[in-house]
Image: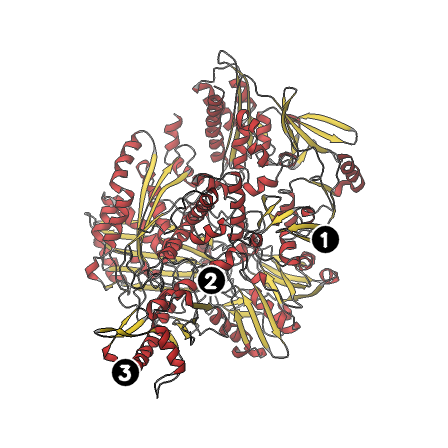
Amino acid sequence: MIKCKTSKEIGGMGHSKKRKEDARFIQGKGNYVDDVKLPGMLYMDIVRSPYAYAKIKNIDASKALEIEGVIAVVTGKDLEKYNLHWMPTLMSDTQMVLPTDTVMYQAQEVAAVIATDRYIARDGKEAVIVEYETMKPLMDPFDALDPDAPILRSDKEGKSDNHIWHWEVGDKEKTDDVFNNADVTVKQQMHIPRIHVASIETCGCVASYDKVKNHLTMYMTTQAPHAIRTVIALVAGHVGLTEEKIRVISPDIGGGFGGKVPVYPGYVIAIAVSFLTGAPIKWIEDRSENLQADSFARDYHITAEMAGTSDGKIQATRFKVLADHGYTDASANPSKFPVGLFSIGTGSYDYGAAYMEADAVYTNKPPGGVAYRCSFRVTEAVHAIERMTDMFAKKVGKDPAQLRMENFIKKEDFPWASPTGWSYDSGDYHAGLKLAMDTVDYDGFRVEQAAARKEGKLMGIGISTFTEVVGAGPSKDFDILGIKMFDSAEIRVHPTGKAIARFGTKSQGQGHETTYAQIIAEELGIPMEHIEIEEGDTDTAPYGLGTYASRSTPTAGAAAAMAARKLRDKAKKIAAHLLEVSEQDLEWEPGKFFVKGAPEKSKTIQELVFAAYTNHPEGMEGGFEATHYYDPPNLTFPSGAYICIVDIDPETCDIKVRRFVAIDDCGNIINPMIVQGQVHGGLTQGIAPAMYEELIYDEAGNILNGTFMDYLVPTAVESPSWETGHTVTPAPHHPIGAKGVGESPTVGAPPAIVNAIVDAVSHLGIKHLEIPVTPFKLYKELKAVGYFDKQEA
Amino acid sequence: MIAEDFNYDAPSSLADAFALLHQYGDDAKILAGGHSLIPMMKLRFAAPTHLIDINNIPGLSYIKEEDGFLKIGAMTREVDLEESDIIEAKYQIFTDASKLIADPQVRNWGTIGGNIAHGDAANDHPAVMMALDAEVEISGQEGKRTVSINEFFHGFYTTAIQHGEILTEIRIPAASGRFGSAYHKAERKVGDYATAGVAAVVRIDESGVCTKAGIGLTNVNAVPMRAERSEQALVGSMLGEADIAKAAQYAAEDCNPSADLRGDEDYKRHLVGVITKRMLNKAVQRAK
Amino acid sequence: MKSITLKINGAEHTAEVSPRTLLVHLIRENFSMTGTHIGCDTTSCGACTILVNGRSVKSCTMLAVQADGKEIITVEGLATAEGLHPIQEGFHLNHALHCGFCTAGLMLRAVELLEKNPNPTEEEIRWGISGNLCRCTGYNNIVKAIQWASAKMQGRELPSTEPEFV
């Protein structure tokens, strides 16, 4: 059980408080972007390219413009007049808003139709005739490196190949040396496929420009409203839309998962059209547009190697990555980290040599990739290290649980310096894995499995003991387009002791309205029910970089605690004044200051706040408000021990997850109910890429599964009943000892599932399986090792 | 996703519906449950100029045993099959199939007639109907005619239904004696179209000899298909392990699957074999 | 244009609509009840689920004209003067929603499920909501919420709503 410092009434950290935001959602009173209706609003629909790579010969909008209600058809040539046809990506690459001559991926925006209602806009879209001259697309990232490959980004001056960047970390020489002298090495090529966040709400906006006031109000599905405001100002400042004239409002968001961080062309077109017409413009994507054009994630080809001793001591890892970014590098990483935080890939294990390198290329696929419920490429890294750990265990003949236990960094060795440069803050990996093994009865399963194999049954158990790196981040390293990645909180306590607090982050379901209130309640003793939380409006909230990569609690959550502590210090001064004692004579218990040794002499926080407005000490500033911008001294390093058991139908190759136990360590827990909910959801987003989801393209550049009929988001039937638990190792440098949890399960689950499936069939000669492991794929692998020959004979 | 505009009528009698079909000609389409048609119209893969909604025509939704047949009205919703006592007691193949068709909301509105009349080999009822030796009643201004399910499916989205006609009833020889039926499909996730599906029906006499066998296959041929060689191998046998294995092997050999995201030809044949074996065993079990 | 009359959440409404108008758009745009959402274009996600004459259907795949004369319940009609519907309470108390976007559709689906099967097993619940996608919750707590509502509606002892987070 989690110990709480505050009473249930105050509801500080550790209480499973029910969520404050639920009331509006369960009664249909949420306010999502498609619910926004403004007078005179026009609707935008987008003509998209059916081809992956083609020259635009002509765009004929005349038929569309004949339709009653179609107001305009906007093309790249129209935007070019205002120099609005290009925009920067968050990675300082460039991206077309609308093309003037060439399309670079299927479903790319080609023209926008503006009409009086969405039905007419759709009719207009169908009536726009575009003539293309197709070219052979470049779909394979390995082909893109070929010296004879066509140069896709000839728009970039001096570009003579399709290579975007090279990155490396670690000690190459030392690592190579360990590999050359190691008893045992294992090596595996693996692909972390292109997938999609597929939040149930798609992207959209209402851009509303007021010509008289020269002011833009932008309602949009964004996880980072302030950063977007700055980007809009950078893109449109030259036409007079400067940052003080822009208000970004991020209303309720129907799931983000990283897919609502980037700026998509549709947003910019809507702004441009509203700017030119003075009418509010609504643009809401269809699901297929969303899947086909926006926010892909992953797509890393990894060659992973591990070296170690014959008795199972890991000594070194070497990872080489080829990253397929599609048409442009539209990742949403911190600017100095082109591979995000992939260098966490040395994992939870104590060894001293690692080298990683990565190269990125352009192809004719949609641009990306976003940090899908992931602290920037951590998922890819964790998959590689956890698969390699299993392969190494297999090769040295050790049980993978035992091997992990023998290689873990010990809890007394933190802070621990990783060979790729991180300083792990804290962890107790042994305790986590032990709890997971006890919960699932690991040894019991091994006995059952041995007996079942004799009867021809296929069942397996898989482990993932991952270390995460979240909470970007310290300003010395972390920025996006130069803006440091701190985050903020502003607390205003009203005279009657009730408060409103505002943040630079933006919840998309994480429950900030509840958890931030609990952090403030913890620090100030004001009941969390009396604290309103507001996010998402750049006119009212303090600047911050938004919610993604599990950064809200590590950054803005810390800011809330720090701002609250400033107020508690002020309350203490007022209490000393009112009780006529010195500050040193006062003690705090949640909700009041009392005189040491005389607890009857006390002042509640509500009395002290009231005094701040009615009777504050001479020389003290009145009011009771504080703001804090929190610049974290380090990242936080949550960890987890996940164990999965699968049963495989030996004939159909259907794979069923029998049990999945997830033990997470996210440091101190603010709200156990919400943490558990985050873990449940993240696990389902972990089983998805492990077994179901992948964006698939053919050689001609066509997406083959661009709708929910073929992009297989798991339902309640595919999703097992998750079993969850936790250990607590606080983050020593964080004001409330919390680490962040939202993405851990999505990062940690896939290798546990794949390791379990491989374990079920390893005795048949299978060493590795690529995700998603579908029954079809498993059938082919089993067939290749002759499994069905025996069966049919 | 928004459809092209069209005209809409909701006649309250079959006669009115036939008249409208004749009036509008080839561009008119019948709207039953609409759960195949409306999505296609939203994607603009289909653009009928007239929709004739037959949901308001009374008397087209029923499940009854009569004259030696199980009779199902064409506008019977999938959910009504799921909840029917007659079906649950005697025709479990429908219970098996219903659970695997799309999802509960779709089954609340989608109709069995629509599922068959759509003429899609990926739908589940066509294989079930083949296994059950169904016949369908097709009505028109000239009256009614009955077509064996074997003659019904002509090609991709085309059936024996002529312009001006409406499928009105499905008839299945009533279950009697030792009768067992079962359906299963492999699917990538719940509600998906079949990677491969098999409907199996057996009738067994007092001495345990199979007197009739029906096997229909889903989504492994351009049109819904019957595994005839498998059926022949079973009739007259005692439905032993070797007989069933033979039938499964023939079904796997005789189907004509094409490769797609769900699997390649080899995998689909393999699944047809495995599922045929399993569904025959299940049907035999139920016939006891 | 066609003239239609229907009852939504007990109140009679009329509208002039073109035949292609989807029922979900009629509800959201014409009648400004925006609690019903749209999450896909292939009848896959269930975010638009409503009750039509008591049956849960996907309102993105029904025409507004088909709702002529029908009785419709949307999320806005679940609560009564006496308070929240047990399914709404169940979702709130069991943390069965995160972003809230799929919630209305899931609750309306669950209302029909519980009417037909007042004491469903976990397996029956999971299959019963298989036409609704939720990307946030992982479904565990949605199952719990429906079990809780079942207990409440049947007058059974209410299950604990504390998280089993050992």
Q: Position of residue A673 (x, y in %)?
A: 37, 55
Q: Is residue B141 above or below residue B40?
A: above
For discs 3 and 2, the disc positioned in front in the rendered view: 3
Cα gap from disc 3 to disc 2, whole angstroms = 73 Å
Q: Position of residue A348 (x, y in %)?
A: 27, 56
The answer for which chain carries disc 1 is C
Amino acid type, residue under disc 1 in the picture: Ser
Residue bearing mark 3 = A580
Residue bearing mark 1 = C18
**Quadrant housing the C terminus of chain A:** top left
Nearest the viewer among A604 and A703 is A604
For discs 3 and 1, the disc positioned in front in the rendered view: 3
What residue do we see at 26% from left, 44% from top? Answer: A394
Residue B255 visible within the image: no
Amino acid type, residue under disc 3 in the picture: Glu
Q: Secondary structure at mark 2?
A: loop
The answer for which chain carries disc 2 is A
Q: Position of residue A329 (x, y in %)?
A: 47, 64
**Quadrant housing the N terminus of chain A:** bottom left
